[in-house]
Structure formats: structure tokens, C-alpha cells
């Protein structure tokens, strides 16, 4: 997507990232630079990466590297900034840029050093545990972030200066969404290894740029099948409502593509209240998703469903046959740059994306024109 | 209880504690000392304290201090040693004693320093969160321990030497039961403030010494109403069975007395499998406990029951009227000193304890002889 069609939060995040990179001194000159065509844009997915909400990843930002041991591939994600005024919701104030600098100069190098000292963290195990602890690893990441912090803390104490370690542990204590980006990169790494299977109707990516929703299917190559993004159905922070909301936004639907997030709502009844629903609604979403997926992931058991596995492997045919669109748990950003999060809710990936993918597969197989 | 009637794990823990205190050089001479009447014994509860399983608390052991802000009282507990060969299951090998020494000399002072630096930790909030994260805060404490670790880690980095902080954080990483003793002391502090209300039939303590189960009721003073302890119904580690098991043991039933633990099984479906049952059994236990309690604790919501509060305030009259005995989640110790944990299961507090308490209250009120 190019600047003229971009939504407010993406523009805001780009302005912030340009200042962060030192390509402009102020958000205003950054806007002029971007408007004038001085910046090249590409989807995170085209660089093996994912980013939540606005999802802006600029060259000097540190990334998480998730290795898919069985697939032999890897994926990247930014580090999560926390809630409030943050780049991923389109904010670009001094506070946002200061945090980005601290993350690049202090947080990421120290975490990297600690990780190298202790060895890699097994994200699949953390996600599996967290699904038994009320997280769905998209909009609720309290358990996973706590488990990750507990695992990394000893090495951090040994490799970082005490005050640096303390500041990082305070940041992790205050950021219940830190694990989101790790979860997303893990999902991306797993799904990429399912991509490119001839004739396969398994969905390997769902992403939203705030204007359109795009879907990739395993058997139809790198092409995105798109449809207009809609405003999620959700709850708003005081003073905001649907008229203020940006349409559905971010790469984080990679979690639903992998069968967690909204697909695992039954594991996270507390999130149902946050996005406007009851624990019974949460069970209902997961049960419905069993109808459009090919398997249950036996590594990811859901306690409230007798430890049944998460609904995994969206089959575009089942989506179209049933008319049941994949459910996505999502934050809601203000439609204007610089404001930030104003709510959270439920979105559905448009059926047209899946119909488009199946049509293309039909053409490739010579079954349709 | 005096030495001749004590069960194996309690004897083993006493032998270990005697060596830990330096009152004897070997477990064997410790046994001789205890057998000969050289040691005075008293229940933890008589000193405002609680200890899980064998529950031995000797003079030089550090304790957690939990303040009940609204009640103005406080309670103590030992620090949790972890699983495996540990004093509370009656083990007294060199490894056990080395750990006790490290806990007294390093762990407790460092945690105390960190706590004084950051200010007190709000245990009620941790328990409330953990109940939404699959813990029942008796036999499952993964979430609560992780949350506690995340809260204390920054201050620990600032106040302890890096290698000391790292070792402590490793200990907390490896001990998913660390929060148990904090949970127990918090329950004790809350229940003590409900004790001593004239005419009240609310149960304020349930405790087991491996030979008898004792119950205290608010309106019957300091007297314990006892009945023989039975072997819990549960699952055993490979190579062990009910014949190896010690009858029900420990002060940890203070958690059930407060409405968590077995009473909050619905919040912890994963524990149902650990003690031999299904998530439906877990829901059933909590639902049954609503029938013998006076209130639902609105601070402790259970997601799987639509955030209904935990069943709180056991009414001895309801227990006797319904014949439904309070359920207790418990570890199972080997009946011989020095072996340790061999399983986990469900026990029921004997009805005779509650009948005894009601009979005494009747006598006090002049309603019965």
C-alpha cells in the first residue's frame, strides 16, 4: 500500500519511524518526506517478518528471531512496546521515540546477550502452557509474558549491569503484551513452512493494513487475496466509539491463522469481557472455528474444552462452504495518526478473500477461468 | 501431637530440622534426641503460622510475614523448598539440609531486602489474577509464582549481588510451588480475623498432622475438633500406591478453609488431571462446595463459572445438614520418613470434626449437654 491510501495509524507510525531512523527531524518533515515518495514501503510478510497493528519495521529496529527447528526456516518480529502511546497504534510523540531508542540501544542488546547465555527459549512450550493459563496469545499475554520473564531473568542478571537488568525487568513487569510479538513470529515461522504446497487450500497468512484484509493460501503462491477491511465489533475506552475507529489493522491475525488468538478464545474467558462478550461466547468462537479448520493441535490443549486441541489449519474451502469467516481478536486503533488505542474487539476476515484464493487455485488447476 | 504418635514424614522433617538447628549432628542422633523428649512440639497454628505437609518450622527458619491490612493481624509461613527431596515431605538428606541453609542464609535475606526496597506485594491481587490463570493456589501455583517472580525481580536486581539475584531467580524459575506458602499465610491471616465471633459456625481452620484432621470453628475458641486422617484418593508416581501413602497431612487445607485450593478446582482444570479427574470433576467440586459455604468471594472470580466468586466461609451446620465434607487438594507423602512425595489427590475433611464443633457450640449455648 502506498502513502495516499494508507490509514491514519500507519501514517503516524511511519512518521515516527522516519524520525527514529534520523531521516527527518520532526514528524512534520517526516510526513513531507513520505508524501513526496522519498520512502519505499513493503509488507512485513515480504521480509519474513510480522508486526502488530501499524506494524512498521524500519531498518535500525531490533527484531526477535524465531527459528522453526522442524521446518528449518525462521521469522522475525519487532519487540513489543507495551500499551498506551506506542508507535504500533500510530503515536509518534517524544515519549514514543524515547522508548524506541531505549529498546534499540538497551533492551534488545541485553535480551540478546541473555538469550545467548542461557540458550534459546522454547516458544511452543510457553504458548502451550499459557493456553492453560488464560492466554490466547494474541490479545491476552499475561501468563506467557510472565513465564518468559521468569525464564530469562536469571541470565539477564548475569549478563547485564544490575540497573539495566532491573529496568528491563520493570519494563517486562509493566508490559503484559511483551509475548505478543514472540507469539506472532512463532506463528509466522510455523505457517511459512506450510506455504507453497501444490493444490493446498490451507490459509497460511491473514494480514490487515487498516484499509484491506489480505489472505495468502498455501497453493496459490505469494499472491494476496484482498477485500476491504471493516471496523471491528468491540468495546471502546471512555469517550470513543465506532466512528473514531480505524478499520481492522495489523499482522497479528497470523495468530488466528495458526489456530490461537480468536480461534483459542475458549482458553481465555477473561478476554471475552475485554472485547465485549461472555465466557460462553468465548467457547462458541472456538467451537465454530473447528468447522473451518482441518485439525486440532494436540500440543495446544484448551482446558475448558476437555483439553481438546486448538482449531488449526484454516481450509478456505470450508470457510466458503460454511460461510463462516475466521474470527480475529484485535485491538482497535483511532483512525487518526498519533492518538493510539481506543478499544478492542472481534473482527471477521472477509469471505471474499477466501473466495478469491479458491478462484485463483481453480484457474491454476484448469478448473475455472 | 507427641513423638510416639507422629507419622513418618513429620518425624523425618523433625530429624532434619534438628540437624538444621545444630541440636544434633546426624539424623540418627536427632531421632534419639526427639524420642527422648528433648524437644518441645506445638502446632504451627498456635504460633500464628502455617506450613505445608509435615509443616515443621524450627526457630532459625526464616518466615514470610503476611499482613492483613483490614483485619490488623498477621500470619507467618515457611518459604517453599520446591518439589523432590524436601523437608516438608519428610526428607532429611544432605541435599535437603544444604537447601535449607541456603534459604536461611541467602534466599530469605535477599527477598526481604528486595521487598523492603519495592514495598509489600499485594497477595490478594496475585491470587485473584492466578485464579483466572489456571491456579487454585494450593496444588497449582504456576501463574501465581510467575506473577510474584515478575513483581519482585526488578528490586532483587537492584538490592542483591548479580550472582545471588541470578541464583534466586533460578530457584524461583524451578519452583512452581513457591507461591503456595504465601497463599497459605494469606489465607491464615484472613481467617484468623474471622475467628472468635460468638455463636459463629464458620470454620476458621482445617489442619492435618498425618494422624488426625483438626478443625477450628469461629464460635468455639481455640479448641480443635479432631477425627482420624485418611489416605487421600489420588494418583501415584510410578512404583507407588495407596499402601505406601501417609494419611492426609499438612496445614495447607487453610487454603480450602478460605475457599480456594480444592474449593476453587473449577479455576484449575489442569490440576484435575494431576489429582486424577477431568475438568468436569473440577467444576463439580466447586459447585458442590457452594452448598456448604455462606458466600461467594467476589474478589476471586472463576472464569469457567462465568466469573462466579469462590465458595467462601464453610458453615459447619451446612456441612452436617448436607453430609457434604469439604474437599481438599493435597500432595501425598510416603508414610516413611525420608522418602518424600509419591502422589497427589483429593481428601475430604471428616464430618466428625464438624459435628464435634457444633456439639461444643450447642453446649456453650446451653442447647445441648
Image (cartoon, coloured by chain):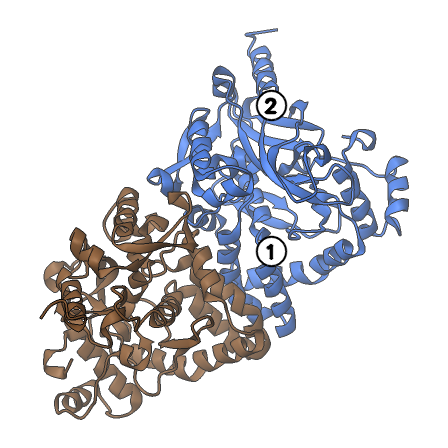
Chain colours: A brown, B blue
Looking at the rendered image, the quarter that the C terminus of chain B falls into is top right
Where residue B204 appears, x then y in whole percent?
Answer: 55, 30
Residue nearer the viewer, B179 or B369? B179
Q: Which chain carries label 2?
A: B
Q: Is residue A124 left or right of residue B30?
A: left
| Residue A53 appears in view | no
SS for dot 2: loop
Residue at left offset 15%, top offset 61%: A350
Where residue B314 appears, x then y in whole percent?
Answer: 49, 27
Q: How crowded is mark 2: few (under 14 residues within 10 Å), some or many (20 or more)?
A: many
Q: Which chain carries label 1?
A: B
Extreme-front residue of the structure? A366
Where residue B94 appears, x then y in whole percent?
Answer: 80, 56
Q: Is residue A337 left or right of residue A162?
A: left
- Using the numbered discs, state the Cα–Cα distance from disc 2 to disc 1 in whole angstroms: 31 Å
Q: Mark 1 points at which residue?
A: B175
Residue nearer the viewer, B120 or A356? A356
Sequence-first disc among 2 and 1: 1
Looking at the rendered image, the quarter that the N terminus of chain B falls into is top right
Residue at left offset 72%, top offset 36%: B244
- Residue B350's tag is 2
B186 vs B143: above or below: above
Q: Residues within 10 Å of mark 1 (few under 14, many from 20)?
A: some
A276 vs B325: above or below: below
SS for dot 1: loop
Amino acid at each position: 500500500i502506498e502513502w495516499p491510501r494508507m490509514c491514519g495509524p500507519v501514517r503516524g507510525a511511519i512518521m515516527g519511524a522516519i524520525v527514529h531512523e534520523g531521516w527527518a527531524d520532526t514528524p512534520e518533515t517526516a510526513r513531507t518526506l513520505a508524501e513526496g515518495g522519498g520512502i519505499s514501503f513493503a509488507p512485513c510478510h515480504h521480509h519474513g517478518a510480522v508486526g502488530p497493528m501499524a506494524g512498521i519495521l524500519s531498518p535500525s529496529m531490533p527484531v526477535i528471531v524465531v527459528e522453526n527447528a522442524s521446518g528449518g526456516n525462521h521469522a522475525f518480529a519487532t519487540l513489543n512496546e507495551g500499551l498506551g502511546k506506542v508507535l504500533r497504534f500510530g503515536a509518534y510523540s517524544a515519549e514514543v521515540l524515547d522508548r524506541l531508542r531505549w529498546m534499540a540501544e538497551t533492551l534488545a542488546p541485553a535480551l540478546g546477550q541473555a538469550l545467548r547465555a542461557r540458550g534459546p527459549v522454547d516458544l511452543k512450550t510457553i504458548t502451550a502452557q499459557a493456553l492453560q493459563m488464560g492466554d490466547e496469545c494474541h490479545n491476552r499475554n499475561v501468563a506467557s509474558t510472565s513465564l518468559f520473564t521468569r525464564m530469562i531473568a536469571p541470565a539477564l542478571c548475569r549478563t547485564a549491569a544490575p540497573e539495566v537488568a532491573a529496568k528491563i525487568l520493570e519494563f517486562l513487569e509493566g508490559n503484559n503484551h511483551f509475548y505478543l510479538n514472540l507469539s506472532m513470529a512463532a506463528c509466522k515461522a510455523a505457517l511459512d513452512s506450510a506455504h507453497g504446497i501444490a493444490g493446498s487450500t490451507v490459509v497460511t497468512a491473514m494480514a490487515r493494513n487498516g484499509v484491506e484484509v489480505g489472505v495468502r493460501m498455501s497453493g496459490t503462491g505469494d499472491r494476496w487475496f484482498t477485500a476491504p477491511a471493516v471496523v471491528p465489533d468491540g468495546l471502546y475506552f471512555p469517550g470513543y466509539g465506532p466512528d473514531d475507529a480505524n478499520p481492522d489493522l495489523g499482522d497479528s491475525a497470523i495468530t488466528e491463522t495458526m489456530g490461537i488468538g480468536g480461534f483459542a478464545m475458549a482458553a481465555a474467558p477473561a478476554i471475552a469481557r475485554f472485547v465485549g462478550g461472555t465466557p460462553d461466547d468465548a467457547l462458541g468462537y472456538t467451537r465454530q472455528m473447528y468447522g473451518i479448520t482441518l485439525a486440532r493441535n494436540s500440543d495446544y490443549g484448551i482446558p475448558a474444552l476437555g483439553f481438546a486441541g486448538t482449531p488449526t489449519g484454516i481450509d478456505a474451502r470450508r470457510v466458503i462452504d460454511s460461510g463462516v469467516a475466521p474470527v480475529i481478536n484485535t485491538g482497535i486503533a483511532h483512525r487518526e495518526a498519533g492518538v493510539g488505542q481506543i478499544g478492542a474487539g472481534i473482527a471477521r476476515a472477509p469471505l471474499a478473500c477466501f473466495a478469491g484464493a479458491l478462484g485463483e487455485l481453480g484457474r491454476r488447476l484448469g478448473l475455472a477461468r
